[in-house]
Each structure stands twice: as C-alpha cells, then as structure tokens.
Image (cartoon, rainbow, N blue to C red):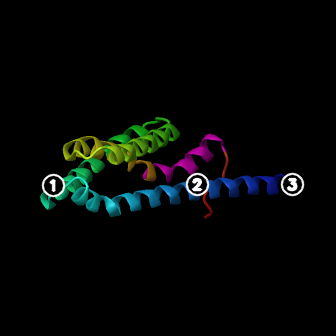
C-alpha cells in the first residue's frame, strides 16, 4: 500500500514538472518567434537594431545565466530562483505589452529576458536536489 501511494505521488510530481517545463518552453518559443516582427512592425526598429537587440539578448543571457547558475550551485534556494526567474518573465511580457520605446526594451527587456531564460535550465536539477533534501532515493523524472 505504501509503495502504491509513493508511486502516485511520484507520478503527480513528474506530471507537474513536465507540464511546467512544457508551458515555459512554449511561452519562450512563442515570444521569441514573434519578437522580430514586433520590433519591426510595432516598435519600428530597422534590421540593424533588431540584430543589435538579438545580439545583446544572447550575450546578456549567457552572462546572467552563468552568474545565476554560479549562485544557485553555491547553495542558494533553487526554487526561489525559479520563482524569481518566472516573475522576471512576467514583468518582461508586461513591459513588451505596454512599451514601444526600442531603447527601454533593449535595456530592460534584455535584462528581464536574460533572467527569465535562466528558469528552464534551473528546472532540470530541481527533482534531484528535492529528492536529496528529502533523503529519498527517487527522482521526479522516470529513468
């Protein structure tokens, strides 16, 4: 009976983990696939500025994700980091919905996007660290 209840808990945790990962990935894919059209049509940025935006986004994303990963690996609360990253993604979406100034979008949008993009890689070690902190020999993901 205990084994059956443990399997049900593991299945619900696996399902929740996979749903959150899927929804986050889908949101990122939808946002970045339409971003160049948004910058060109609504912000009226020329192709050079769109390239600058994507370059700044890539460079800032690498730097900020490395910095956040370093702090996460040193023992910071990973769940709190994921929540902050998702909040940054929400703020980024609100910023893009309400603002049409390219330079504000470049500075704040790239910063928030870089923080938000760290959420997805932070999900991957979470099941193992949760299982280790609970001293369980299982993880949320099936082998």
Q: Mark 2 points at which residue?
A: 17
* Residue pointed to by mark 3: 1
Mark 2, Cα crowd under 10 Å, few <14 / some 14-19 / many 20+, is: some
- Give the label, 3 or 2, closer to the camera: 2
Residue 65 seen in the figure = no
Residue 107, image quadrant: top left
Residue 109 in the image, given as x and y percentages of width and height: 29, 45
Label 3, label 2: how far apart the Cα atoms are? 24 Å
Expressed as whole percent of the image width and height from the top left, the position of residue 124 reads 50, 54
* Image quadrant in which you'd find residue 67: top left
Q: In this rendering, does residue 116 appear at all?
A: yes
Q: Is residue 29 magenta?
A: no
Disc nearer the start of the sequence (3/2): 3
Q: Nearer the viewer, mark 3 or mark 1?
A: 1
In the depicted structure, whether residue 105 falls above or below residue 15: above
What is the CA distance from the residue labelled 2 to the residue labelled 1?
37 Å
Of 138 and 84, nearer the camera is 84
The C terminus, quarter of image: bottom right
Q: Is mark 2 on a helix, strand or loop?
A: helix
| Magenta range | 121-135
Residue at screen point 65% across, 53% down: 13
| Of callouts 3 and 1, the N-terminal one | 3
Q: What is the distance, in whole Å, between disc 3 and disc 1 at their CAs? A: 62 Å
User: Where residue 49 is drawn, which disc sits there?
Assistant: 1
Magenta highlight: main SS: helix
Looking at the image, is 54 positioned above or below residue 96?
below
- Asked if the residue at tag 1 contacts the one at tag 3, i.e. Cβ–Cβ closer than 8 Å, the answer is no
């Amino acid at each position: 009976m205990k084994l059956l209840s443990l399997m049900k808990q593991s299945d619900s945790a696996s399902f929740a983990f996979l749903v959150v990962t899927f929804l986050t990935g889908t949101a990122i894919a939808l946002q970045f696939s339409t971003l160049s059209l948004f910058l060109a049509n609504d912000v009226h940025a020329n192709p050079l500025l769109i390239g600058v935006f994507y370059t700044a986004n890539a460079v800032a994303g690498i730097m900020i994700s490395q910095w956040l990963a370093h702090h996460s690996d040193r023992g910071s609360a990973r769940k709190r980091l994921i929540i902050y990253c998702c909040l940054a993604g929400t703020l980024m979406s609100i910023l893009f919905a309400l603002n049409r100034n390219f330079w504000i979008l470049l500075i704040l949008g790239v910063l928030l996007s870089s923080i938000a993009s760290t959420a997805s890689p932070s999900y991957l070690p979470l099941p193992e660290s949760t299982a280790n902190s609970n001293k369980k020999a299982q993880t949320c993901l099936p082998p």
